[in-house]
Structures are given as structure tokens and as C-alpha cells.
Amino acid sequence: MSIWERSRVVAVLGAAAVVAAGVAAPASAAAEVEQVVNGAFDTSTEPFWANAGMTLALDDGRACADVPGGTTNKWDAIVGQNDIDLVAGETYRFSFDASGDPAGRGVRAVVGLAVDPYDTYFEQSPVLGATQHYEWTFTAGASTAQGQVAFQLGGSPEPWRFCVDNVSLVGGVPPEVYEPDTGPRVRVNQVAYVPKGPKGATLVTEATTALPWKLADRAGKVVAQGRSTPRGVDVSSGQNVHSVDFSRYTRKGTGYTLTVDGETSRPFDIGAEAYEKLRTDALKFYYTQRSGIAIDDALRPGYGRPAGHVDVAPNQGDGDVPCQAGVCDYRLDVRGGWYDAGDHGKYVVNGGISVWELLNAYERSPGLKKVGLAIPESGNRTPDLLNEVRWELDFLLRMQVPAGQPYAGMAHHKIHDQNWTGLPLLPHLDPQPRELHPVSTAATLNLAATAAQAARVYKKYDAAFAQRALTAARTAYAAAKANPDRYAPESDGVGGGAYNDAKVTDDFYWAAAELFLTTGEKGYQADVLSSPEHTADVFGAGAFDWGNTAAAGRLDLALVPNRLPGLPAVKASVIAGAEKYLAIQRQHAYGVPYAPAGNSWDWGSNSTILNNMVVIAAAHKLTGRDRFRDGVLTGLDYIFGRNALNISYVTGYGEVSSQNQHSRWYARQLDPALPNPPVGTLAGGPNSSIQDPYAQSKLTGCVGQFCYIDDIQSWSTNELTINWNAPLASIAAYVAEL
């Protein structure tokens, strides 16, 4: 799960949408009322104002300002107007004409609160060039007489000129209706079907009886045909659908298409090569997430950047970080690790589950030992995956409280900025003070589990590090047992995600399991066997995530050779969990092994689906039964385009894929000088709770699969995170070795 990034945004936009041609709007329920004064700048610029030493002046009927270079944040240079009236529930049309010289400069156009806490009610970030008209609608979630229309212009290293005209905020307008472009009604895996694996597609149609389908090769020759199977209304999307099964066709090739009901699918391949590439790409993602090291453009063309948070201004750095006020009186060097998601925070519990899943894949998939990742450590006689994970492990070890201090041996829950920052912002330009947050039992057990796991995995390559990791794991586990109820609070969510967790029996079970698997010691064995999690059904709607880790312990107990009493029952429980997910998948018209209660899709649902597939893959390893292999392959179809939105959720894979995941430095949507996320980056996916204002503005009332939008502002549906790419890499490694 990603961070709960509030970014000082409240309120909540109801039915907002960018004005789109061809979308009919209902009649207005009230008279339209202009809220902005003198937005046409006919004779003066008043009552608009400018800060940062800028002078706002008329230029050919427009208001223009020379924006200084060398600022860090968007809000360091602002043009705006205060005393704007807003009424909760009222729909507004926000529009203006603007230009930027030189072209390519981004502006953050905001309707928000003019006084502390400066809440944002609506925002967009167009990239300016020649004069262009911009227009959106949104529904205000709060009433105020102290509103503000603002153009935030800072963050450019070079000076530039901003001009604006016809600024308007009109109340009483009808809400617009957002309709996603879902392309052809035949939904397929846009990447590749494995030749001897299952091959399924889903048709969206009004028809209720079987329809003929045809599979064509790249040249348009029909190579297979059959009839669809009506499935009725799919609960997860609200669509009437049919299934198409063309599994009997096994010839490798590229550019296949499927035609049914007068619609032709997007093209796809039949072959396994794409998954070998995906295995590498999904793992390469982690290098560009690194903190504390310059990213070498020669290793990742287009992604090179200076080191972030290494105590070089404007960074305040991670080399000597204090605690939050009143938490501790020491400072720690917590450089390194991976940035968690689209922000600059680093979190032990999310780093922990990410490390575990990558090392679990390493222990399960021998081919990962040979995968080259083109990282600085490549060629040092240690597998590249272990080199990459070591970058995070070293950070996790640094988060442990030193001996002689209160709560010695425990781990600080997280380290991040004192306050939220805006987008875009490269790591080395982050000016915020950094803070260590209180220790937590959950974080401490994450450290114990992953350090114990690392001790056995790294022993062959670095015995000294393995011993250091095991010592840290033992110390952490003992400290957690001495402090079993140090919970991370939900309220600690300013500047970074809270990652609150008040249930830690699962973390104790996982840590005890990893320590037992590494040491074989009776004490840890006893803790495993006495845990209430050991006999519980730990495979719920989602098998595991950062807040639910019992399944991590269960999977490793089943897969890593050991002599635990009752081991056959442990393995049987994993197989039973996988059977549960297969049963769900068989009932799902889109072949998804996931059915959340009330059709309420979770934050990061794509990772939940992939984690369920990790359980299914484990059952295949334990049994060798083909149905588990087929379940994994069918689940991948959803990720790569066989879904209600007809989109591949992995950047660069498929004809139409997610490109604008929420990130401060993969932010091309906001600044064309920055890149999109790297190829192989997983988007979070449908989230029924749509917590961010942008998603609320587009998706209010959405059904299941439709609760997603590929926009950088949608942090609740479209973020990227280290723990979401981990199951993608794990499953890609599994498929590559079939």
C-alpha cells in the first residue's frame, strides 16, 4: 500500500472534469456567478498580486510577470487573487488563457484557501508554451470567504516570463461527466500469452447469446475461431460480458488480434520472451528509486540525477537526522535505502515487505541469480538482485536504535520530510528538514524478519554481513518482545504516510518464522507453533501487504526447507489458500483472483492481485499441478489489459499502458524535461475509496474496476511504490522460468 499523501489537500471535489468535446452537460440548476474580479485585465492588474519580488504588469491586455530562476518549490513564486467566495457542493468552472516563455514551463493552477492551513480545493498543472485556453470544472467540498485563485510558478532553475488573461471562476455551472476512453470492446492481454498456457479474453457487449470470434495473425489470416461464452453482468465493472477462450492455439507469433461482435482487439503476441524482459525491467525500477546515491545516466538513460538527501543544499540530508520533538535526543545516519513511492519518505514497514518479497523470489526462482540489472555494483560476484536489495537492507539496519538508548534494538518506524512537498521535485532539491519518527513494534519486527532472511540468503556471498544481519535480527526480536505494543499512530501523517498498524501478532509470527528458518533454534520454533497466526486462515481477500504479514511467514515456512513439526499442514494451508483464489478467478469474467467484500477495491489493488498470484505460484511449486500455473498466467492477463479499462497497468508494456504514475521526479506530465516512470513500473490500480481530490473530481460513483485514472495527481489510484513492484518482479520471474 502506498503513502496516504494528503499534500494539504482537502475537500473534495465531487463531479469535476476537464471540459471535453462531445460530452453533453445537463442544464444548470442555478445562475452562473463570476467570482474573480478583473480577470480580463482591461485597465489594470488589481486586485491580483505577485510575490517573490515579481512585478505584475499589463502587456498587450494581459497580466505578465518575470518569474525568477533558482527557486525550489512551486509556491516560491505566485500570482494570485484572494477573497474568493466558495460554497460547498457548488460546481465551478475555472478557466484562463496563459503562456510561458520559454516554452515548457509548468504552472500549478490552484483554487484554495488563502490563509493557513492553505488547503487546496482544486489544482491542475499545465505545461505552458504559446497562449492556450485552459478550462476545468470541479465541485467545492468546503465553504469559505477566504478563497484564492493562484498560479504557482516557482521551481525553475532559469528565469521565464508568465502571462495570463481571462481568468475566471464561475459558480453555478453544471458538472461535467468524465468518460474514460476504453478502446475496443474486446479486452485482451496486450503483451503476450504463453504458447502452452491459457488464453482468455473478455468481450463487453449487449448480446446475451454466444457470438462467433476469429483469431487473426499479423498478416490478417484467420488462424482460429470459435464462439464466446456469455457471462452476464460482471459485478466488478457493471458490464455485460462474454468470455473467449482460444487456448488451443499455441503457435508463437506477434501482432495477433481477436475479432468478435464487430470489434477487433488491440494487438498481442504469443510467446514468453516478454516476461524475461519484464523480470529485468521490474527489478531495474529499484535503482532509480535509490536515495543517497547519484543515478548514473549511462546506466539508466534519461533518468540520471544527483544524489538525493546526502546533506548537500538545499537538502537538509539523511546523514545526521534528529527525531521529532520529544521522541529522542540522539541523531542517526540513515542515508541510503529506496524512496518509498512518489515522495521522498523511507518507511521500515514498506521497505520490509518489499525486501522480503524480493528475497522470497530469489530463494524460489533460481534464474534470478543470473539476471543482470546494470547497477553500479554489477560484476562484484554477488547476484545483482542481492546487490540491489542490499541497498535497502543497509538502510533498514541504520534505523535500529543504538545500544544504550531508550528502546535500544527497536526500529524507528520511518524517516521523511517535516512537511509535504509539491510536484514536481527531484530528491536533491527537497529543502525540507528530515525527521526520525518514533519506534514501533511493527517496524522492529519487520527488521527482525528481513534481517534474519538476509542472514541465510547472503551468507554465501558476504558472511560478515550475514552475521551482522542475524545479530540485528535477534536484537530486534528481543526488543519487540519487550515492547509488544508500541503502535504507529494513524495521526502521524504530515510530511509522509502514517503506515499505522495496531495488530502485530502477524509481524511476530513472520519474524519468528524467519529466525527459525535461518537458525533452526527451538525458541523461535516454539514461538511459531504457539502463535495464533500459525493455525489461522491467513489468506483473505488479499494475501499479504505491509500491514498483513502472516502469509509471508507461512509461505517461507512452506517453501524454505526446514524441520518444523507439522510442516505438511503448513504446506496444505498454502495450497488451500491458492485453491480459494482459483475458485474466485473461475467465477470472474475478467479472470481476476480477487473479489473484495462489497466490490470495494483496495488501495493498490493491482499489488493485491499480484500477491494473491504469488500464493498461487507457491502452490504450483509445492504440487506441480498445472491449474496453479494456469491461474497465475490468467491473472497476468488482467494486469496487461484484459480489464474494464482496457489498459496495461505496467508502463511500457502493451499498446496502451499507464504512463503518469504519481511521482515527484518521474513527472513528465508536469514538466517535459522530466521522464515518465521507467518501463516496468506498476500502477496502483482501481481504488474504490478514491481518496485524492483529482480522482474524486473524475470518478465519484465509480464501480470497482473503473475507480482508476492515469493522471499524476491521482495518488490514491495511480501511485507507484517499492512494495507494488515487488510482486510484479516476483511473478515475472516465475513466468520466465516456466
Image (spheres, rainbow, N blue to C red):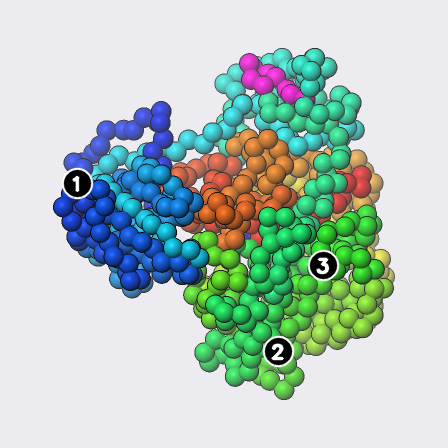
Considering the numbered disc 3 on the image, is that residue within a helix, a strand or a loop? loop
Q: In this view, does 222 lie above or below 147?
A: above
**What's the mark number on residue 664?**
none
**Which circle's residue, 3 or 1, is located before the other in the chain?**
1
- Between disc 3 and disc 2, whose residue precedes? 3
Name the N-terminal-most of marks 2 and 1: 1
Query: Residue at 72% across / 44% down in the picture?
Result: 279
Q: Which residue is drawn at 58% across and 77% down?
A: 332
Q: Can residue 407 be seen in this view?
A: yes
Q: How far apart are marks 3 and 2 (CA)?
A: 29 Å
By secondary structure, the bulk of the magenta-drawn segment is best described as strand
Q: Residue 520 occupies which quadrant of the picture?
A: bottom right
Q: For the residues marked 2 and 1, what is the alpha-carbon distance in whole angstroms?
A: 59 Å
Contact check, label 3 and label 1, Cβ < 8 Å: no
- Classify mark 1: helix, strand or loop: strand
Residue range corresponding to the magenta coloring: 256-264
Q: Do the residues labelled 2 and 1 touch (CB within 8 Å)?
A: no
Residue kind at label 1, given as amino acid type = Val
Q: What residue type is labelled 2?
A: Val
Q: Which of marks 2 and 1 is in front?
A: 1
Residue 554 located within the stretch drawn in magenta = no
Query: In the rendered image, which residue does mark 1 sit on?
Result: 33
Quarter-wise, where is residue 262 in the image?
top right
- Quickly name the residue at label 3: 376
Residue at the disc numbered 2: 401
Q: Which of marks 3 and 1 is in front?
A: 3
SS for callout 2: loop
Quick check: 463 left or right of 107? right
> Quick check: marks 3 and 2 in contact, CB under 8 Å?
no
Please rate how many residues cluster around mark 1, counting C-alpha atoms within 10 Å: few if below 14, some from 14 to 19, many from 20.
few
